[in-house]
Image (cartoon, helix red, strand yellow):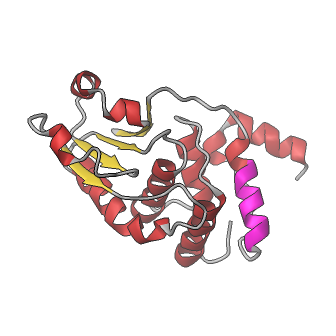
């Protein structure tokens, strides 16, 4: 299939596009996943819906109490948790909070949070809630956690998860996080793309 045909296929329906990623070569896989991330449109406001009732946002969206109320969020997952702001910020709002103290560094092991975060998101959505997953900018840490959720709980491959999330928000996980997502993909699906 020519690159022009692949691009045409992606533009007609990004979710059905089948990127050919060689997961057996870690360095090459990261480059191919980055290429997939940069293709297409990037839509970013303070918080964007990327799956029904699942939003990725930035710190501003998570700290805007009136907007949180207006949008009826029931859960907040903070992927940049610090002692500065935590669950007490949401007291009296009916919001369930989970904080992950993650660093946006390629050396940080975000994968240790995949199962806990995916369970929190899944529980919120299964219970009819509406969840905001955020970090400082809403493109790396929070995106990585949402992609892991899509793979673990929605049975998507990494490519399917990226294409789904990209429909709602431009994301750019750092290279270390991409390697961890590739490792998760291989664990779940082997080397198939």
Image mark count: 0
Task: Tell me the quarter of the picture where residue 49 sits.
Answer: top left
Q: Nearer the viewer, residue 180 or 87?
A: 87
Q: Is residue 176 magenta?
A: no
Question: Of all residues shown, which one is farthest toward the front?
Answer: 84
Above-or-below relation of 23 to 101: below
Residue 90 relative to residue 29: left or right: left
Q: Main secondary structure of the magenta part?
A: helix
Q: Is residue 34 magenta?
A: yes
Above-or-below relation of 65 to 18: above
Query: Which residue is at 8% across, 35% downward?
Result: 92
Highlighted magenta segment, given as a residue range: 26-35
Query: Which residue is at 54% across, 29% downward?
Result: 44
Q: Nearer the viewer, residue 71 or 188?
A: 71
Query: Which residue is at 26% across, 54% downward?
Result: 98
Residue 152 relative to residue 5: left or right: left
Task: Tell me the quarter of the picture where residue 175 sits.
Answer: bottom right
Asked if one can make out residue 22 in the rendered structure from this viewpoint, the answer is no
Q: Quadrant of the C terminus?
A: bottom right
Above-or-below relation of 159 to 28: above
Residue 38 at x, y = what percent? 71, 42
Question: Of all residues shown, which one is farthest toward the left?
Answer: 92
Residue 43 at x, y = what percent? 57, 29
Residue 105 relative to residue 9: left or right: left
Residue 31 at x, y = what percent? 77, 59
Asked if one can make out residue 28 in the rendered structure from this viewpoint, the answer is yes
Q: Nearer the viewer, residue 145 or 154?
A: 145
Task: Tell me the quarter of the picture where residue 56 sits.
Answer: top left
Residue 28 relative to residue 146: left or right: right
Residue 24 at x, y = what percent? 74, 77
């Amino acid at each position: 299939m020519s690159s022009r045909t692949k691009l045409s296929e992606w533009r007609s329906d990004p979710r059905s596009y089948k990127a050919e990623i060689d997961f057996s070569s870690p360095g090459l896989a990261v480059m191919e996943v980055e290429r997939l991330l940069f293709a297409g449109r990037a839509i970013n406001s303070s918080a964007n819906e990327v799956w029904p009732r699942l939003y990725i946002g930035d710190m501003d969206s998570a700290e805007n109490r009136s907007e949180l109320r207006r949008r009826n969020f029931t859960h907040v997952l903070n992927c940049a948790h610090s002692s500065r702001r935590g669950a007490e910020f949401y007291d009296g709002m009916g919001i369930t909070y989970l904080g992950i103290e993650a660093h946006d560094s390629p050396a940080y092991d975000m994968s240790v949070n995949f199962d806990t975060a995916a369970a929190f998101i899944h529980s919120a959505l299964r219970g009819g809630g509406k969840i905001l997953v955020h970090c400082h900018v809403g493109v790396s840490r929070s995106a990585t956690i949402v992609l892991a959720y899509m793979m673990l709980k929605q049975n998507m491959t990494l490519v399917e998860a990226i294409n789904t999330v990209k429909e709602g928000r431009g994301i750019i996980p750092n290279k270390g996080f991409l390697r961890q997502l590739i490792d998760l993909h291989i664990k779940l699906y082997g080397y198939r793309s």
